[in-house]
Amino acid sequence: MQLTAKRAAAALLLIALSAATGCSGDSDAGATSGAGAEPEVKSTPTALEAASLKLPLDTYQLSSDELDRLAAAQSALVARCMHRFGFAFRMPDSPPQPEPPDGNERRYGTTDRATAAKYGYQPKPPPHRKAPASKPAPTSEDPAETSVLMGKGQRSWKGKPIPEKGCAGEAARGLSSGAPPLSDSETQTAQNLSAESFARSQQDSRVRAVFSRWAQCMKKRGYDYATPLDPPGDPRFTKQVTAQQIETANADITCKKKTNLIGVWFAVESRYQKDLVAANRSTLEKLRRNNRAQLAEAARVTGRATPR
């Protein structure tokens, strides 16, 4: 499990969202169904490419595109608030980040042969983007601007009271105004459960068995790895794409296909996630409504239609 780096606006969004999620007291969010016997898997698909596979918890998590939409709306609301206080503020453009995986594309390791043929185990490079029409405003060291932005320091500026947690907090509350309030722990429920299902699935006897078959397949091709999560972490493959890395990734994908590793692992993890969803349904549904409400407000702020 990993989340790719977001734009600078997204970073501000994540900081500011804590201003709008309510209390961070104890909650039953994240309660699990407990560790018992391995759950029954009734059907196992034959699958190789994981990008199109949808796990039960995906419904309750924001995609990279949706996070970007929230970040864009957050930036717009922050800029409007700062303008009220006389600051020509604009979120700085961050350097392009590696292209995030599509859906569950790399959840179970590399699965796309065309991508592996170009990049091996490396992330896709940033898409080409035209230079911005104008340079972003330079970062200010003005303490007054910082106070207005983040709500730290002075409580008013030129006779106007600074919003709680500054313009960042006001923007976050604006996005969340029509959404059910969430505690800090509730906002992390889907991610935490997803991490749990991923860890539990790796200990499942059916997944361990297919790992063993995959490892045997790789050994016949001259590679010594215990699990499909090992090759991407090989120190030889962490800096740049090499012919050896591409050859390894191709063998990796061939063995995944030969053993139906992706189909088995996905089926097992899906079953664990179904149990976790059932055990945490009320919190997850509250989280889903919160996400939908924020995306709808973001669409209203930016004029961009919500895709779903």
Image (tube, grey):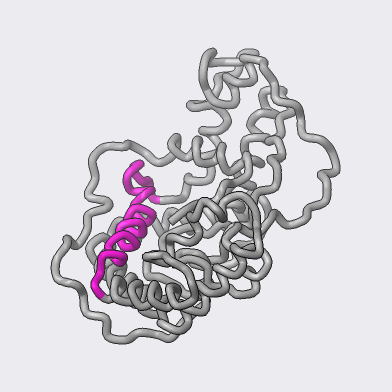
Q: Is residue 295 magenta?
A: no
Q: Quadrant of the N terminus?
A: bottom left
Identify the residue at the far left of this view.
36
Vertical arrangement, residue 111 with respect to residue 139, above or below = below
Q: Nearer the viewer, residue 86 or 199?
A: 199
Can you give x and y, in whole percent of width and height, for residue 219 in the image? Answer: 43, 73
Q: Is residue 184 magenta?
A: yes
Direction from residue 126 to residue 10 in the image, left or right:
left
Vertical arrangement, residue 200 with respect to residue 251, above or below = above
Q: Nearer the viewer, residue 287 or 11?
A: 11
Residue at coordinates 50% horizontally, 64% vertically from top-left? 106
Label total for image: 0
Q: Quadrant of the C terminus?
A: bottom right
Residue at coordinates 53% horizontally, 45% vertically from top-left? 175
Can you give x and y, in whole percent of width and height, for residue 239 in the image? Answer: 61, 49
The magenta region covers 180-205
Direction from residue 172 to residue 59 in the image, left or right:
left
Asked which quadrant contains residue 91, the reply is top right
Residue at coordinates 52% horizontally, 23% vertically from top-left? 151
Q: Is residue 116 visible?
A: yes
Q: Is residue 173 visible?
A: no
